[in-house]
């Protein structure tokens, strides 16, 4: 699992469990579900991880802390991208 370092606001501490535990777990779970839905190339999975990481941490920045909602939001975002790009996430 790869942790993403982001600048902290004055109100957050480095030990924020949402950023250190919940968000990375939500990213991994959403990616696992995404991989199970349909076989995809490694490049697509890597791009999906990048998209999920950005989107889920964006949700955390907006105050979301529920892991299930983060997972659902991440998967919905991937689905929207696929729909907009004609079922293509990757390069």
Image (spheres, rainbow, N blue to C red):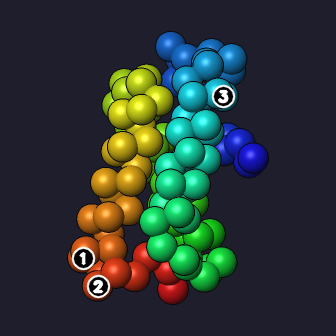
Disc 2 marks which residue?
86
Q: Is residue 27 shown left or right of residue 4?
A: left
Q: Nearer the viewer, residue 91 or 30?
A: 30
Q: Are marks 1 and 2 in contact (CB under 8 Å)?
A: yes
Label 3 environment density (alpha carbons within 10 Å; few <14, some 14–19, many ≥20): some
Q: Is residue 19 left or right of residue 78?
A: right
Left or right: 4 in relation to 81: right
Mark 2: which secondary structure?
loop
How many dots with numbers? 3
Residue lying at the far right of the rendered structure: 1
- Report the residue marked by disc 1: 84
Q: State the image quarter where residue 21 is shown.
A: top right
CA gap, disc 1 and disc 2: 6 Å
> Compared with residue 49, is residue 46 higher up or lower down, i.e. above or below?
below
Tell me residue 8's x, y (percent). 58, 28
Label 3 belongs to which residue?
A: 20
**Secondary structure beneath label 3:** helix
Dot 2 or dot 3: first in sequence order is: 3
Query: Residue at 43% of width from left, 42% of height from top?
Result: 71
Let me know if residue 58 appears in the view.
no
How dense is the environment of label 2, judged by Cα within 10 Å: few (below 14), some, or many (20 and up)? few
Check disc 1 and report its element: helix, strand or loop.
helix
At a point 68% along the width and 21% down the height, the residue shown is 14
Q: Position of residue 39 (x, y in %)?
A: 54, 77
Residue 49: quarter of image: bottom right
Q: Nearer the viewer, mark 2 or mark 3?
A: 2
Q: Which mark is residue 18?
A: none
- Mark 1–mark 3 Cα distance, whole angstroms, equals 31 Å
Q: Position of residue 11 (x, y in %)?
A: 50, 13
Q: Are marks 1 and 3 in contact (CB under 8 Å)?
A: no
């Amino acid at each position: 699992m790869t942790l993403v370092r982001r600048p902290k606001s004055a109100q957050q501490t480095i030990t924020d469990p949402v950023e250190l535990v919940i968000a990375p777990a939500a990213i991994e779970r959403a990616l696992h579900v995404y991989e199970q839905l349909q076989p995809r190339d490694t490049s697509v999975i890597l791009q999906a991880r990048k998209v999920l990481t950005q989107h889920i941490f964006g949700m955390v920045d907006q105050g979301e802390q529920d892991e299930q909602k983060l997972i659902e939001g991440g998967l919905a975002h991937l689905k929207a991208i696929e729909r907009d790009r004609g079922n293509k996430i990757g390069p």
